[in-house]
Image (cartoon, rainbow, N blue to C red):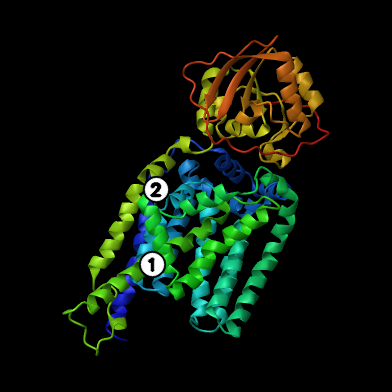
Amino acid sequence: MTSGQPSRTTAGVVAVVVPAVVMLAAGLWGLDRGGMWGDESVTFLVAWRTVPQIWRLVHEVDAVHGLYYLFMHAVLPVHPGEVVLRLPSVCAAAATAALVAALGVRLARPRVGLWAGLLYAVTPLTGHYAQEGRSYALVAAGVAGATLLLVRAMDGGPGRPGAVWWPYGCVLAVTCLLHELAVLAVCAHAATLALARVPRAVWSGWARAVGVAGVVLLPLVWVSQGQSGQVGWLVAPGWDRVERLVRSLFAGPTGAVFWVSVLLLVGGLGARRVAVVACPLLVLPPVILMGVSQVRPLYHDRYVLYALAGAPLLVAAGAERVVAGVGRLRELRPGARRPPRRRPPCRRLPYRRPVVVLAGVLAVAFAFLQSFALHLDDRSPDHRPDNLAAVADLAARRVRPGDPVLFLPSVGRLAALTYPRGFRRTWDIALEESGSRSGTLWGRETGPGELRRRLASVDRVWVVAEPYALTSRWSPGDPTERAKLTVVKEQFSPHEEYVRRGVTLRLYLRGTPVSEPSTPSMVAPASPTPRPPMTAPVSPTVRPRPGRW
């Protein structure tokens, strides 16, 4: 072993550990925002159900997140609350930063890995999903790990050929079970093998590993095909979504940081060994999903979060090429001292010039400062589509015990289920069967006829409504939702109204409608980005049994 190898190993370890620590610190910063939003509350509620109840749910309505719910079912009992709910995502984001750095170390050199890992850690999009109680950060970690195993297999890997492909297949299978759209990473890996012109033996081992992962994934794909209504709110992406995705790939979405990052990324395409891995991962999953979504809308930025790992690798490789170009210019300068021929440049230790490494770290720190306002906004509950804790707190102060409450649409019931203290001793007038008993996300509601009978027996009702539900353009397909709208408009008049983060709490009194409901001065502005409508199955024949808290 040469004297330079231990130092290179130490440098590689440092390059991997530092980004993980930075990402962990960024993820823990402001982790307790003081309220869950809709999707996080679904994770929280489903994870508290029993395993048979979770199994029934994923067969009925939400199979794509089944493995994640079972994982959180084991995690949440440690300490129920928002911090533990989001902690797995924080740890997964830190692991992804370390894996991105490890890819840079293996494909180029330690300082490239250090810069790439730090860039990943300070990107606002990474920080956003690192603090979400959903599966997307875990999926990103799985894809990054599978990509690193792919590179090891391409380089030969230790021991027998199958010693690398089996771990690759297992990681890929688990990642796709966490979210089935992670399968698009397989297309990126296939393009990497084609661009690298690997021998036939590598293709054979990769195909066997992917085949095993595909067999494991088939049941999930089969079940989820019948649950496409869960993403029925998605629309075909246009050029605005493309622009938003491109700007979210870098630490600074606007200004000089963005354009410098773009230039360095383009320069990184010249680093062939990095480009054949990072470029397909960055480009193919979003492009394929956007193309498919023109026919069947499935695209959302979070579904291809794992593609983000390719951007910092290319930017760091571009920065390395700039450093190498400056070094060559200095050597070609008249009167410059040339290095002795007996010591080729490839034998130089990667950290012999710490000023270069420090300059790259400072550049990343500057990019973080440029986007600091975005990171700060992400730590606020108002930056999410809604804040169920604020809605429940408002209901606790305004709704009287025994008052009937109507959720319009039924997804609004998540606020009462997640924070039941705010709706204590109120009557959920439309509820027929709870979510855990019915195998649905937020419960099964009664039929239109029974709902009309119940509403006929009350003189006041509180409506918890999404913003789109109060507009004349919304026309629900569910008959119970239509009955809610019709009865409230025809038989009741609005009296008081309160708004919290896009959710409206309105009191209706029986009688002829008045001009406008009285809105107190304490009302907060409505959310500019309301949560999209979601639907739950409704049983056509159920026995009347009002639900109360």
Report the number of discs: 2
Relative depth, front residue between 529 and 437: 529
Instruction: Give the alpha-carbon distance from disc 2 to disc 1, as whole Å.
Output: 30 Å
Judging from the image, what secondary structure is the residue with disc 2 in?
helix
Rendered location of residue 368, percent (x, y): 35, 51
Which amino acid does the dot numbered 2 rest on?
Leu
Rendered location of residue 499, percent (x, y): 53, 24
Q: Is residue 484 above or below residue 187?
A: above
Label 1 sits on residue: 318
Label 2 sits on residue: 28
Residue 209 seen = yes
Q: Is residue 460 left or right of residue 391?
A: right
Quadrant housing the N terminus: bottom left
Judging from the image, what secondary structure is the residue with disc 1 in?
helix
Image quadrant where residue 339 sits: bottom left
Mark 2 or mark 1: whose residue is earlier in sequence: 2
Which amino acid does the dot numbered 1 rest on?
Gly
Relative depth, front residue between 280 and 257: 257
Q: Is residue 92 left or right of residue 207?
A: left
Rendered location of residue 521, percent (x, y): 47, 16
Decide: few, some or many residues near mark 1? Use Cα within 10 Å; few <14, some 14-19, many ≥20. Answer: many
Relative depth, front residue between 260 and 366: 260
Q: Is residue 483 left or right of residue 466?
A: right
Image quadrant where residue 402 sits: top right
Rendered location of residue 217, percent (x, y): 67, 63
Q: Is residue 197 above or below residue 56?
A: below
**Image depth: mark 2 or mark 1 in front:** 1
